[in-house]
Image: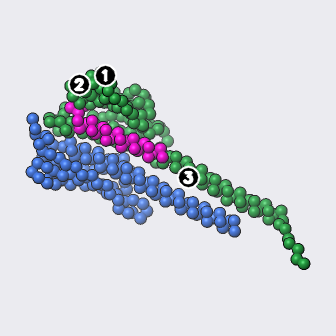
Chain colours: A green, B blue
Amino acid sequence: MSRRRGYSLIECLATIAMIGTVMTTVAVSMSGMQRASQRIREEVAIEADLQRLAAQLRADGHNALSAKMAGGKTEDAAAGSILLTLSDKESVRYSVKADHLQREHLQGEKLLHRESYRLPEDCTARWELEENDSVPLVSLTVEPTPGDAKDRWNNWNTEIIAAVGLLKPTPAKSEP
Amino acid sequence: MAVGLAMALAVGIAQLLVIVAQQRRLARQQEVATREAGNLMERVAARSWDDTTTAALESTALSENASVWLPGGEVSVDVIEEEPDVKRMTVEIRWQSGSESRAESARLVGWKFRAQEESP
């Protein structure tokens, strides 16, 4: 009659250690993938906002009669804005806030509509108005805050350019 | 057995992560190229009618940021006068992607009308 042999303590410990190693590997991998997934979701959301902003800025720019800058580099909130004059009464103002960019449609001083576009974290935004022989160009540059560690994937160095007055009968003139 | 399984799992996950990283890079490159093409199109559209020609736009180059993201990046702007008062402008950006150096491209087409500039 054969007698069934059991497992030694060493065998049990070795098996437990191996299972532990496999479980740890899986847990670490899953955690890393979840973090990556979260970051990608954020990037996609920001990218979608930037695309929406680009489309709106260009539509406003093409319809504008003129563009006027207010403020320069924007390292803190409530700084840096640009005003696009659509007609005698209507205008659109884009302002950079702490973590978003705000668009306000104005009729005189009366606010008709306001919307915001999310900006990437740890980034600053600045406006530039480029004079041209025919049509001025407005550009918004989003770049990492100086001094911050630059992660290649989070390097949102982005520029959006819009021509001013393309759809108006006469070429637009920018105001200094 | 368990070690073998763990190794196979690790290799599989590593391959998956490499593929995800490659796709992520390609997606970002497409975004950068598309935005760059949009910016270049605005610059082209802002030029005067007479100045909007293929020859005048031959020296068009990628921005500094786009050059960083698009290895081997090249830009071409093609202007064709379809009708006497209509010009078709094509901005095309090409670059090499991945270790296999696969050619990628992004293209944007716009039209310019002379009457728009000359009407009173």
* Residue A138 inside the magenta-drawn segment: no
The numbered dot on residue A110 is 1
Q: Is residue B42 above or below residue A105?
A: below
- Marking on residue A33: 3
Name the spot of residue B62 as percent of width and height, x first.
30, 50
For residue A89, which numbered disc appears in the image?
Answer: 2
Q: CA distance from mark 2 to mark 3?
A: 52 Å
Task: For marks 1 and 3, give the CA distance.
Answer: 48 Å
Of the numbered discs 2 and 1, the one sitting upstream in the chain is 2
Which is in the foreground here, disc 2 or disc 3? 2
The stretch in magenta equals: A41-67
Amino acid marked by disc 1: Lys
Residue B9 against residue A89 in the figure, above or below:
below
Q: Is residue A2 visible?
A: yes
From this view, report whether residue B7 is shown above or below residue A93: below
What is the chain identity of the residue bearing mark 1? A
Along the horizontal axis of the image, is A105 left or right of B3?
A: left
Q: Is residue B39 left or right of residue B85?
A: right
Q: Nearer the viewer, residue A155 or A48?
A: A48
